[in-house]
Amino acid sequence: MSFSGISEQEHPRVTPAVQWLIALNVAIYFLQLTVVRSADMAAALAFTLPDLTQRPWTIFTYMFVHAGFWHVTLNMYTLWLFGPRVERAWGAKSFTLFYLLCGLGRWLFFVMLTRTGYLLGASAAIYGVMLAYAMRWPDDEMVLFPFIFLAIKVKWLVVLLAGFNLALGLWSASAASSGVAYFAHLGGFVFGWLYLKASSSSGLDRLRHRISQVPDEPDDHPPRAIPRSPSRSNRERTEIDEIVARSNAAVATNKPGKSRNPLLPLSRRFGKKKTDELNRVLDKISAKGIESLTTDERVLLEEMSKRLRNS
């Protein structure tokens, strides 16, 4: 599998959290091949239902032990393919938390729906990462090879994987099979989707929902924002919200005949070119919606948001 139309700058190959996760999984598999037998490693780290009270740490450790070469190889390749760009957008800490949460989703689905056999592998955590990628960059295309040379959008790939696991889970249940826990895989998708919806972690969503309206100035126009949704609470406001809110107060208290631009420090910090680009992007969101933004425009908003947080 490989992506088409994504530059190296936008999709770095290795980021810190992805690098550590891959290294840990590979190291444990190497131990399985050299020092510890696979059966012993599974007995120590994989999860079975009695482990819920006897060895509770296996709720987490099951994600780092795999059943064989192709199991660990395909999982780590997929993490390497999708993970770095998501981590770059969120940061290593948030990415790692999300990864572990999706893994816990698989464990919970296993306890509720499967209950037999043992649980191991990072598949569900990686499915959650794929879902996060698809929700943020749904129309990116990837080529499936070396199996087949077929270009497919990421959003449809995630839908196909979810449907595949659901169908095989139903088949396994009807055949009384205790092999792969396909239903448990869906826990990664479900927990990932719930987390993304509940946290609204995307800076773009916050720009769309939480930034208040800024009146236009006749001279040196500041960046214009989108009206904040009335359903949002004040405590959820981002750093950008606070800056724009302060600008509203400054505009309201300006004395007649005195020219003042409340966002002038912002324009000085970013420069006129960046400020004009931000104006254009915010106007585009207001007119056509956040889904109309290109990848470069989304990167611009993420960059501005990050610089404001660090200022």
Image (cartoon, rainbow, N blue to C red):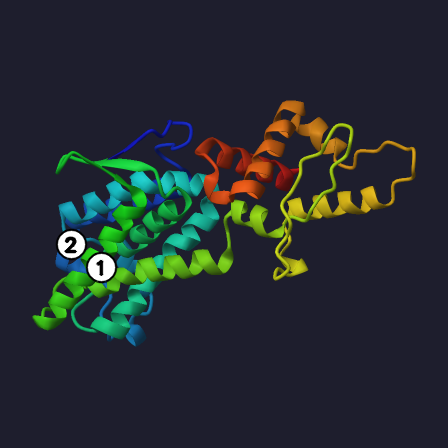
- The quarter of the rendered structure image containing the N terminus is top left
Q: Please indicate, yes or no, whether residue 101 appears anywhere in the rendered image.
A: no
Q: Nearer the viewer, residue 276 or 133?
A: 276
Furthest-left residue in view? 175
Q: Where residue 310 sits: x, y (%)?
A: 63, 39
Q: Which mark is residue 272?
A: none
Q: Amino acid at mark 2?
A: Ala
* Label 2 sits on residue: 67
Q: Where residue 159 sits: x, y (%)?
A: 27, 52
For disc 1, the neighbor class at 10 Å (few under 14, some 14 to 19, many from 20) is many
* Residue at disc 2, secondary structure: loop
* Label 1 sits on residue: 120
The answer to the question of whether label 1 and label 2 lie on touching residues, with beta carbons closer than 8 A, is yes
In which quarter of the view is residue 181 placed?
bottom left
For disc 2, the neighbor class at 10 Å (few under 14, some 14 to 19, many from 20) is some
**Left or right: 182 in relation to 239:** left
Q: Nearer the viewer, residue 132 or 289?
A: 289
**Left or right: 102 in relation to 311:** left
Q: Please indicate, yes or no, whether residue 262 appears anywhere in the rendered image.
A: yes
Q: Where residue 40 sits: x, y (%)?
A: 16, 60
Q: Nearer the viewer, residue 70 or 288?
A: 288
In which quarter of the view is residue 167 placed?
bottom left
Query: At 69% across and 29% down in the image, what residue appears?
Result: 269
Whether residue 222 is situated above or below residue 90 in the rendered picture: above
How far apart marks 1 and 2 lie (CA) works out to 7 Å
Query: At 47% across and 50% down in the image, what residue appears?
Result: 94
Query: At 45% across and 34% down in the image, what residue appears?
Result: 294
In which quarter of the view is residue 270 placed?
top right
Query: At 69% across and 46% down in the image, what residue appears?
Result: 213
Q: Earlier in the sequence, mark 1 or mark 2?
A: 2
Q: Amino acid at mark 1?
A: Leu
- The quarter of the rendered structure image containing the C terminus is top right
